[in-house]
Image (cartoon, grey):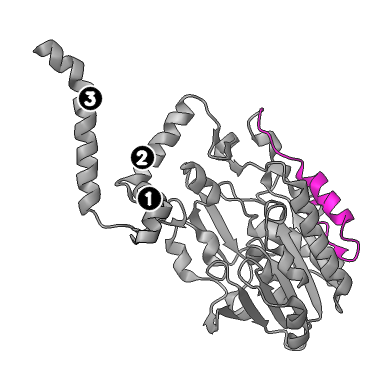
Amino acid sequence: MTKRLTKYAPMLVFCVFIAVCFAINLVKPDREQSERENRLLAQSPELTVESFFSGEFMADFETYLVDQFFARDAWVSLKTYAELAIQKTDLNGVYVGADGLLVQKFAEPEADRVAANASFVEKFAANADVPVYFTVIPGAAAFWGDRLPAYAQNADQLAIIEAIYAQTPSAITVDTAAALAPHASEPIYYETDHHWTSLGAYHGYVAAAHAMGLSPTDLGHPIESVAGFYGTASAACGLRPGEGDVVELYVPAKAAKVTVFEDDTAELIALYDESAKEKSDKYTLFFGGNHPRVLIESTVSDGPKLLYIKDSYANACAPYFTAHFSEIHLIDLRYYKKSIADYIAENGIDAVFVAYSAANFTSDTNIMFIAR
């Protein structure tokens, strides 16, 4: 009897474990989002005859079970540390580098997608009645390769960016890569997130200002520093090294009035979202995250108007332009699908700045809307 119990003990323990997990999942409340992973969690799907027979319900229910599994964050962390124990340094597309650096892999992009996106920008710039400035911003892997594992495979972002510029002769190129390169030893990117820091964004702003014929303002000292930021790379791999990153703010909040437009609504917000200080993703300090359209009205009442077509890298950079423009219109083509040409005419725009991170520009399927 003892031998039989010993033989089947592992199976019995596993069955008990599954039963306990099932019981806990039945009674525990569902979570709406995971602060650790910086994302919304799947909710219980609605069962219909159509969704059942199409297989959609079972697929959605499986996602729901995975997202709502009890102690999910602990299991994700356990998996991560188990992978580290076997010296794996590529965790869910994130390289674990020196001193706790987490960098998302930059894979070789699809050539057709890159060429198409460049052609959309070229068509837009060629037909625009105002100057169009254009930049593609390299990510951390372009400059911090010496801090990544020896075998780390990343596509050559700088070469890809140069090829993109060659396909957009009608746009005025802003060489952000050249502006960042001399500062590669400085904290121009976050250690746990894919974005550039406020310092990196400042160097990008300086390059754009020079291209636009403007005299950039001095950076000065940060007016506020918000610690404990764990970003997208941390969320993707489940690691939270050290005390996290620090988000530094340089432009006073009173320097601008900000209006966010969502669908048919308009909401006046602060330049910096104070509620983000309590969140894991503190990059949302800038405007509370991404929106279809944002209007920044500065104290430079007699200045020109800038249209900034962008991804989330612009959120940290746009505040610097309040020193030069009376209005800065931010448009995110992932959410805004109306005519950009009409927008320029209707809002008296004087210049356009198209700015994307290399990762987004080489993969985004929404850039086509710029040329409509």
**Corner quadrant of residue 18:** top left
Element assignment for label 3: helix
Amino acid type assigned to the residue bearing label 2 in the image: Trp
Q: Locate residue 369, reporting x and y percent.
A: 71, 69
Query: What is the quadrant of the N terminus in the image?
Result: top left
Amino acid type assigned to the residue bearing label 1 in the image: Met
Residue ID for mark 1: 58
Amino acid type assigned to the residue bearing label 3 in the image: Met
Q: Which residues are magenta?
A: 151-177
Query: What is the quadrant of the C terminus in the image?
Result: bottom right
Element assignment for label 1: helix
Residue drawn 65% across the image and 35% down it: 147
Q: Locate residue 311, reporting x and y percent.
A: 66, 63
* Residue 16 left/right relative to 353: left
Measured Cα–Cα span from mark 2 to mark 3: 21 Å
Measured Cα–Cα span from mark 2 to mark 1: 23 Å
Q: Disc 2 vs disc 1: Cβ atoms closer than 8 Å?
A: no
Measured Cα–Cα span from mark 3 to mark 1: 27 Å
> Which of 67/171 is in front?
67
Q: Is residue 169 magenta?
A: yes
Residue ID for mark 3: 11
Residue 75 numbered mark, or none: 2
